[in-house]
Image (spheres, rainbow, N blue to C red):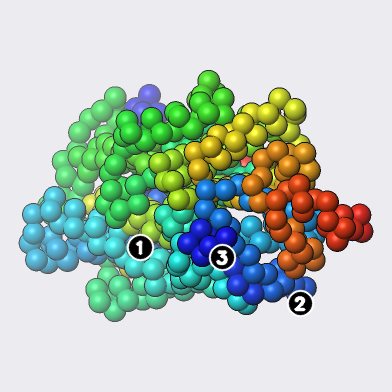
Amino acid sequence: MEILSQLILNGVIAGALYALMALGFNLIYGVTRFFNLAHGVLAAIGGYAFFTLSKTLGLNIYLGAAIGVAVAGLAGYGFDRLVYSTLRKRKASNLVLLVASLGVFTTAQAALSILFTSNFQTLSSGEAGGSALSLFGGVVTRTQLVIIFSSIASMLGLAALLKGTMFGKAVRAISDDEEVARMVGINTGRVTGYVFFIGSAIAGFAGILAGFDTGIQPTMGMGLLLKGVIASIIGGVGNIYGGVLGAFLLGLVENFGIWKIPGEWKDAVSFVLLIVFLIFRPQGIMKR
Amino acid sequence: MTKTDAILKTRNLTKQFDGVRAVDDLSISIAKGKVTSVIGPNGSGKTTLTNVLSGLASIDGGSVVLHSVALKKIRPFDMPSYGMTRTFQEVRLFEQMPVLDNVLVVLTERSVFGALFERHGAFHEKQAEEALKKVGLWEKRNEPASTLSYGQRKLLEIARVLALSAGRQTDIILLDEPFAGLFPKMVKTVSSIVKALRDEGRTVVLIEHNMDLIRELSDHVIVMDSGKFLAEGRAAEVLERRDVIEAYLGE
């Protein structure tokens, strides 16, 4: 019984983190229609921005986290202005954009290694993850509780933004038909820029939370990106609600998958789930 | 027509596709406050002209002046702000969004931070409601656009341009074959909308095939053939001209 609740808890914690990655990834995909591989490195940028501000410069952790999230958002916005929107203006195909985003990913990751070395760093002070609590017979750290709650809060916040504001309507219009959106007076380039900011800021937030839970290193982005992408594909690419569902499913399957086998097989379990979906339900749980 | 009457002018306008001149050396004016029909046999370049005038396709040669601004200088998403709104021959809606949102979205705040935080205000909702009531789709406001019938889809697109140009007397409303494929009852709805616009002194450019509707609705007719200007004048006169009839018969 205890093992069962611990596995569920672990699954939910992992899922919450993947959900944050999937959220930003799907938001950006919905508007731009390309696989933004650089999305992963924004998590690392968020983590290192926080590391510099709060651990090196000693800023208050909440302020540090807020600025770290903003730095990741601005970095994502900058990548869009500098690279993707320039390419889009030249009518580059989505394949070109995908390759460009891989370039952005590699370059930014290398820059992080140069600036901060490739050593592993922890963000939390004192014992890893803060004090542990007992919940439904399982053990969960304070950090992990923060991950779960802030992930849910981000989802609700984003859903409210997309549903309730003019900006959200513009985003949905662009996902539907970018050309018509432009013809009816929506500044699609600007809205896309905002979307990059918001999506990247969420990734930065995920990076900071992951850093608190396990630590940061420049290459952390790839792992988070892969899980975010798998969650998106399982849930339905471009559908932010589907992505969240996919993320929790992925987190749970991954953790239940290693119930009887060694933990190193976790990633293999995720990919098996991905392959199963690609074969039997390629459109994901929720179609766009 | 005096110079000040023209709201939109093309001079030696040319647009090519793979070496074919879809619009060829075309110089026309669209008069303010009138319904101008652009007609011509299939492949005469009407749709290409529509795409160029609305900023969807680039200009290859010559110039277009809209409200004394060179069209080349207007960014595509600024076209409605400069007074150009259009419908599409093949209706293009935001399929996943409800009917009401399809109209509300065109009223989006365009300022930098306004866009992020503004909720649609009562003012916007009123405008959207008016537009939807004009086309008779208000009852369907909460249904996704993808569930509408063919005719309703055309009407929704018209509601969108009505909302976009609401209260903007000098806008050009470009309707690309708004009657094509409609049932007689809906043809009536659309033609009464066009008549209402004409009575309000709005500027409408109508791309149309149905001669009866052209006679009934237009103040002025421009005939195109093979991308070139062929004739213009009052519908009754132009449609009797031998060269116009021949252009159609030669189709």
Crowd class of label 1 (few under 14; some 14 to 19; many from 20; radius 10 Å): many
Q: Distance from label 3 to label 2 (Cα)?
A: 24 Å
Answer above or below: position of A43 versus A261: below
Disc 1 + disc 2, Cβ < 8 Å:
no
In this figure, which residue is indicated by the disc labeled 1?
Answer: A76
Q: Amino acid at mark 1?
A: Gly
Q: Is residue B207 visible?
A: yes
Which circle's residue, 3 or 2, is located before the other in the chain?
3
Q: Amino acid at mark 2?
A: Gly
Residue at the (34%, 39%) spot, across then down: A165
Quadrant where the C terminus of chain A is found in the figure:
top right
In this figure, which residue is indicated by the disc labeled 3?
Answer: B9
Given the image, what chain letter belongs to the residue carrying mark 3? B
Q: Amino acid at mark 3?
A: Lys
Q: Nearer the viewer, residue B118 or A231?
A: B118
Badge 2 element: loop
Q: Distance from label 1 to label 3 (Cα)?
A: 42 Å
Residue at the (70%, 55%) spot, across then down: B233
Badge 1 element: helix
Exactly how many numbered labels are in the figure?
3
